Amino acid sequence: MNNLIARAKELLENKIVQVIVGYEAGPTGVARPAFITNPAKADLLIYDERCVQNLAVYLTKPEVRNLGKMAIVATLPVMRSIMMLISEQQIFADNIIVLGVSSDGSLLDIADIKVMQAYIEKSDLGNPVKDRALLVELNKLSKEERFAYWQKELSKCIKCYACRQACPLCYCTRCTVEVNQPQWIPVQSNTHGNMEWHILRAMHLAGRCISCGECGRACPVGIPCHLLTMQLADEVHNYFKVYAGTSEKMSSVLSTFEPNDKESFII
């Protein structure tokens, strides 16, 4: 932790970056995003088990970009999100410094994107253990039972779009759900429209989701919507042997054809 604070101060004092994106303790003790621009306030930075939010979501926000070149406290999911954003040309590697944090909270020496890629490649890229267990149980159900399960869960959706706002890969300036000429997705919250929204979002993230679970964590009514994108992450890996966020030159899995791709989806 002291190493992280010292490095943050160094970067700000030497004007290498203008802002540090990290975590600080809120008034109730809950960890929240911090945007540190003054070296004297670097002591506010924390990193512990409370720090779960995927901070990469702020990298594409104009109000954060306008602060200047940034350094970001990055766990494995954040690093993978950064890789995806670079590969999709939403951010540029030269405009960001990664303050990598290992699973035990130690500061990593991430000198450049190649070093970060090497760290990612040697990490466990599967879904989190607790979510793997939930997916195993869901996949034991018949198709009819799974459909009924998701109908019940998604009927709770209030269309607040917190799942979208929490996701680093949902960066479109205008989402399909906000298009009303023509109206693609019903505005009102009902089971049919809710399923359309969540299936649409899951498919948009197929081959892009890095399994951080932020969408499910952000849901105010407790819908485990992260399991939809994590299931597709498993399917993409099973079919194409690809995990999202492993390279700065990721190809779009669902729009790229390779001669050795499996064709089991053809009936």
Image: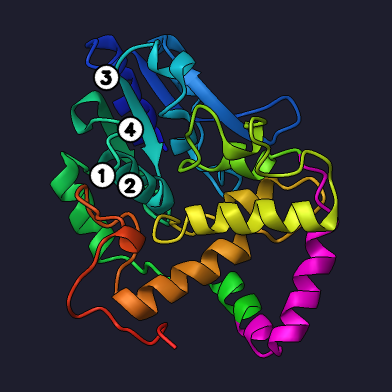
Q: Amino acid at mark 1?
A: Ser
Q: Amino acid at mark 2?
A: Met
Measuring from the top left, give residue 134's x and y in whole percent: 65, 76
Residue at horizontal 24 percent and vertical 63 percent from the top? 121
Q: Amino acid at mark 3?
A: Leu
- Per the rendered image, the range of residues in magenta is 136-159
Q: In terms of secondary structure, where does tag 2 sit?
A: helix
Sooner in the amino-acid sequence: mark 1 or mark 3: 3
Q: How far is the residue under mark 1 from the one under mark 4?
A: 8 Å
Q: In the rendering, which numbered label is found on residue 66? A: none
Residue 116 or residue 164, whichever sits in front: 164
State yes or no: residue 149 in magenta.
Answer: yes
Which of pointers 4 and 3 indicates the residue nearer the eye? 4
Q: Is residue 128 visible?
A: no
Measuring from the top left, give residue 138's x and y in whole percent: 67, 81
Residue under pointer 4: 90
Residue under pointer 3: 11
Q: How far is the residue under mark 1 from the one under mark 2?
A: 5 Å
Residue under pointer 1: 87
Residue under pointer 2: 84
Residue at horizontal 27 percent and vertical 19 percent from the top? 10
Q: In terms of secondary structure, where does tag 1 sit?
A: helix
Q: How far is the residue under mark 4 from the one under mark 3?
A: 23 Å
Label pair 1/2, CB-CB below 8 angstroms: yes
- Residue count near mark 3 (Cα–Cα under 10 Å), binned few <14, some 14–19, many ≥20: some
The image quadrant where one finds the N terminus is top left
